[in-house]
Image (tube, rainbow, N blue to C red):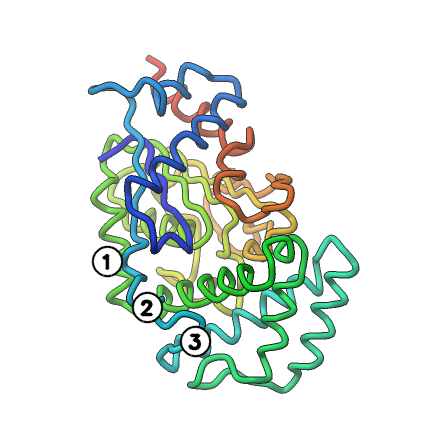
Amino acid sequence: MAEIVLVHGIGQQQKSPDTVESEYLPNLAGGIRLAGDPGLADRIWRNARPGDLSARVAFYGDLFRQADQQGDQFDLPPEAAGIAAQLTLDWAQQIADHGTRETDRERARRALEQAEGTLPDAQGLRAGLRPVLNALTRIRPMAALGEAVAGRLLRTAIIQVSRYLTDDTIRAAVQDRVAVLIGPETKVVVGHSLGSVVAFEAAHRLGQPLPLLVTLGSPLGLRNIVYHRVRPQPPSVPPQVRRWVNIADRDDLVAADLNLQRRFPGAAGVLETTYTVDNGAHPHDAKFYLTTTEAGRPVVETLSRCSAP
C-alpha cells in the first residue's frame, strides 16, 4: 500500500510495472518541484528510503496483451465493437465542435458527413467509419506522430476503453490491481486517461476517506460511451473523496468535457474542473500532465495538510 497511488492509461501493454513506475514517478516529482516543494519531490523520487513517503503505480497493462495481439483488427465482441464505433464518432464530433484549429474542425466535420448513417455493428468498425478514424490520425497533434503510429495509438485506445467497459473479468482484474495499493495511509490517487476511469471507480469502492483524487486527460465526460457505463450509476462524486481535481488540455480529444461538475453531483466544493493546461504537441501524454504545476500543486497542498500536526 502507498500514500500516493498513480493509475496509468492506455497503451502500456508492452511495458512492466517497473518501467511504467520509472516514467511516472519522476514526472510527478517534477510537477511537485515546479509547484514549489522540492523536498517533497525528493521524497517521492530521488531519495526514497524505507519509512519515507511511498508512491506506487497500479499497473494493469499486461491484462490487455491478449486483446491487442490482433494488431490493427477490431476483433471485439458485439457490445465492445459497438462501443468502439461510437467512441470513434464521439471523438470526431468533439473535434468538430470544440477543436482549437479550424482546419481540424473542418476535417472532422467532413469525415462525419461521409460516415453519416453508418451505425456500429457486431463486426467492429464498419467500412463507413474508416474515414473518421483516418481523419483523426491527420488532426494535429496526432499528425505529428505519423499516420501509422497515430492510427495504432487510436486503435489501442478504442480497443482498451471498449474492453474495460464491457468485459467484467478485465474490469475486476484491473480494480484488484488498484485495490492492493490503496489503504488507510493513501492520501492521493492520480489517474490518467483510462486510468482516471479506473481511479474514479476505485474511489467509489473505498471504505475510508481519500483526501485527493486527481484525474488527467479524463474521458469521464464522454456522455454516450464512458459516462453511462462507469460504475456505480448514476455517476457522482465518490463520497469518500474530499477533493477531486480534474485537469485537461483543450486539444486532448480524450478529455471530451472539461467541466465535469454538471455531470457529477456531490458535496459542494469537492470537484474542481476549471484546470486547463497546454501540453504542446502531445496533449494527451501522461508525462506532460504530471509535470504541470496544476497537477503538482494539489498534491503538495494535500500532503502538507495531512502531515500538519
Query: Which residue is denoted by mark 2 in the rendering?
Result: 67
Residue at mark 1 to residue at mark 3: CA–CA distance: 22 Å
In the figure, residue 161 lies in which quadrant?
A: bottom left
Q: Nearer the viewer, mark 1 or mark 3?
A: 3
Residue type at numbered disc 2: Ala
Q: Residue at x 29, y 30 (%)?
A: 3
Q: Nearer the viewer, mark 1 or mark 2?
A: 2
Q: In this rendering, is residue 26 above or below 146?
A: above
Residue at mark 3 to residue at mark 2: CA–CA distance: 10 Å
Q: Residue at x 41, y 45 (%)?
A: 191
In the figure, residue 26 lies in which quadrant?
A: top left
Residue at mark 1 to residue at mark 2: CA–CA distance: 14 Å
**Towards the viewer: 241 or 112:** 112
Say which label, 3 or 2, has the lower sequence index: 2
Label placed on residue 159: none
Query: Decide: marks 3, 2 in contact (CB < 8 A)?
Result: no
Q: Position of residue 208 (x, y in %)?
A: 26, 39
Q: Residue at x 53, y 74 (%)?
A: 86
Q: Position of residue 205 (x, y in %)?
A: 28, 50
Query: Which residue is denoted by mark 1 in the rendering?
Result: 173
Residue type at numbered disc 3: Phe
**Towards the viewer: 185 or 290:** 290
Q: Position of residue 157 (x, y in %)?
A: 46, 61
**Which SS class for mark 3?**
loop
